[in-house]
Image (spheres, helix red, strand yellow):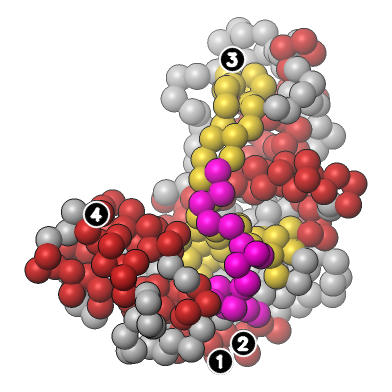
Amino acid sequence: SSFDPRFAGNRFGVVMHDVFERCDFAAWHAWRPGQAAPDGQAAPILEALQRGGYAQDELDDGLRMLTALIGHTLTVALPEGTRLADVPEPQRRNEMEFHFAMRPTRVDALLALLHRFGVVGDRQAFGARQRLEGLMTGLIDLTYTVDGRWYVLDYKSNRLPSYDADALARAMAHSEYELQALIYTVALHRWLRFRLGAAYDYARDFGGVRYLFCRGVDAGRNAVVAAASEFVVETVGTSIADQRTPQPARDSTLDRPDAARNSGATTAGVPSAPLGDPAPGIHAWRFEPALVQALDALFAGKPSDALSNEVLEQPSANGVEPLSPRERGWGEG
């Protein structure tokens, strides 16, 4: 459809997220591209548009636009083989709020860890700060479980020139969405560990991250996506030292059909294998367990085997002394 500037930008993005938060996923189960909103689902769309400040004469066009975006997003086949419309309400949570304490964290140590695993490789600082600390807070658009594995999902309303794997990889890198997703992953990882204790294992129980660029998803291509799901590769968070040519999945514990679906993409310097004809608009991957565990430990003020003590202990360039064990702290809040 042609671009309509009324339904773009931050305001429209807020409205779209509002609809996802309030609509009934299951009501869209039988929706097909080109159809009107299912019974009872036009109301939450119109109400969200009105809350967003849209005028009465804009509501019909907004309803058509959002019906298509919501419908395709809720009925497109996800890499793990399900659709959001098919995930029962008890197995998902909208707008999951998180708060966790960041113990004093050296910026150079943080960047060394991120760069080691190929994340935000172009970033060399976080402003002028040498240490980061305080309370990390945020909202995860959607968390859900399928076959006992947990997923983080974020809806994006970005308008991109195209929505193939390369375009999504560029958008992810440009906006540093991978760093955002990594923080979301650590937050959910901590919550699951707190709730489940020893019964939780990231490598087994965390399915991955899905960033859905809603203007590009196409539920009409579901059959094609299913055919492309034969192969697997981790796309983000593989240690630079461990990169090698991706192969079809062999280890069912680590490499699962939900690990990635991005053909020909190069994300944060980590190549992925061609996977046939992937789903446009869906950027899906899982962070390497070693990265999540190391970042979790770093934020908690705990030395990590995955991050060399040499990096943690050396003074920074401006002469700031390394953190003492007391400064690092031992809780995680």
Viewer-nearest of labels 3 and 1?
A: 1
Circle 1: element type: helix
Residue 299's disc number: none
Asked whether 93 falls inside the magenta stretch, the response is yes
Q: State the extent of the magenta-drawn residues as a range.
A: 81-97
Q: Is residue 172 left or right of residue 267?
A: left
- CB under 8 Å between discs 1 and 2: yes
Q: CA distance from mark 1 to mark 4?
A: 36 Å
Circle 4: element type: loop
Q: Which residue is mark 4?
A: 52
Crowding around mark 2 (Cα neighbors within 10 Å: few <14, some 14 to 19, many 20+) is some
When the figure is inspected, residue 294 is found, relative to residue 30, above or below; the finding is: above
Query: Which of disc 4 and disc 2 is earlier in sequence?
Result: 4
Q: CA distance from mark 3 to mark 1?
A: 54 Å
Q: Amino acid at mark 1?
A: Ala
Q: Quadrant of the N terminus?
A: bottom left
- CB under 8 Å between discs 1 and 4: no
Residue 226's disc number: 2
Q: Nearer the viewer, residue 17 or 167?
A: 17
State the image quarter where residue 107 is shown. Answer: top right
When the figure is inspected, residue 31 is found, relative to residue 212, above or below; the finding is: below
Q: Is residue 32 left or right of residue 230?
A: left
State the image quarter where residue 7 is shown. Answer: bottom left
Q: Is residue 153 left or right of residue 310?
A: left
Residue found at the very far left of the displayed protein? 57
Crowding around mark 3 (Cα neighbors within 10 Å: few <14, some 14 to 19, many 20+) is few
Q: Position of residue 202 (x, y in %)?
A: 79, 53
Q: Which residue is mark 1?
A: 223
Q: Amino acid at mark 4?
A: Gly
Query: Which of disc 3 and disc 2 is earlier in sequence?
Result: 2
When the figure is inspected, residue 95 is found, relative to residue 103, above or below; the finding is: below
Viewer-nearest of labels 2 and 3?
A: 2
